[in-house]
Image (cartoon, rainbow, N blue to C red):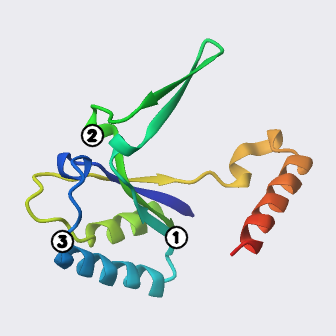
């Protein structure tokens, strides 16, 4: 199963504080473990919401909302995309994640990624073929 592991923002990440050398070193070691275990497919940190925007769709209209956004607990500071055998395996890996010093609390959320078979009959053979073509094109760019 693929899952997205979402590192929630904190007041510190939203203020633009960068990780310490110690934390970067610990995260580098942790990411190396994930890669060697064949789990990590991708992973990135994100700039604070003050550098981002949201696009809202409502009533047939689109509205662009510039950051920063006020609800820190709803924001994302970074993510990984993992390939694991189960949610339990993902949880065990997250428990090993290095934590920044001086941060009172930090949440990491784990969400399974939809796979083609999750969509049932609505995901027709034509749509599956289109999806496979797009994935092959993306893979060819690497």
Screen quadrant of the C terminus: bottom right
Residue at position x 68%, y 48% in the image? 118
Mark in the foreground, 1 or 3: 3
Instruction: Name the residue tied to disc 2.
Output: 73
132 with respect to 7 (left or right): right
Location of residue 132 in the rendering, given as x and y in whole percent from the top left corner: 82, 61
- Identify the residue at the far right of this view: 126
Spatial CA distance of label 2 from label 1 is 28 Å
Circle 2 sits in a helix, a strand or a loop, which is it? helix
Q: Nearer the viewer, mark 2 or mark 1?
A: 2
Local SS, label 3: loop
Q: Say which residue label 3 marks.
A: 20
Q: Nearer the viewer, mark 2 or mark 3?
A: 3
First in sequence: mark 1 vs mark 3: 3
Q: For mark 1, does the 10 Å Cα neighbourhood hold few (<14), some (14 to 19), or many (20 or more) residues?
A: few
Q: Earlier in the sequence, mark 2 or mark 3?
A: 3
Taking depth in this image into account, of 29 and 47 the one nearest to the observer is 47
Image position, residue 16 (x, y; %): 24, 53
Q: State if disc 3 and disc 2 touch (CB < 8 Å).
A: no
Quarter of the picture holding the N terminus: bottom right
Residue to which mark 1 is pinned: 85
Q: Earlier in the sequence, mark 2 or mark 1?
A: 2
Q: Residues within 10 Å of mark 2 (few under 14, many from 20)?
A: few
Q: Residue furthest top?
A: 59
Q: x%, y% of residue 61?
A: 62, 16
């Amino acid at each position: 199963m693929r899952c997205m592991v979402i590192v929630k923002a904190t007041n510190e990440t939203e203020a633009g504080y960068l990780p310490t050398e110690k934390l970067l070193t610990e995260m580098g070691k942790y990411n190396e473990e994930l890669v060697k275990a064949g789990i990590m497919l991708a992973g990135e940190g994100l700039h604070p919401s003050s550098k981002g925007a949201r696009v809202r769709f409502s009533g047939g209209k689109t509205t662009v909302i510039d950051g920063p956004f006020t609800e820190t607990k709803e924001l994302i500071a970074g993510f990984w995309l993992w390939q694991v055998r189960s949610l339990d395996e993902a949880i065990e890996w997250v428990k090993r994640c290095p934590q920044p010093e001086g941060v009172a609390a930090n949440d990491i959320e784990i969400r399974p990624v939809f796979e083609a078979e999750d969509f049932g009959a609505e995901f027709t053979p034509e749509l599956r073929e289109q999806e496979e073509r797009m994935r092959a094109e993306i893979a060819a760019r690497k």
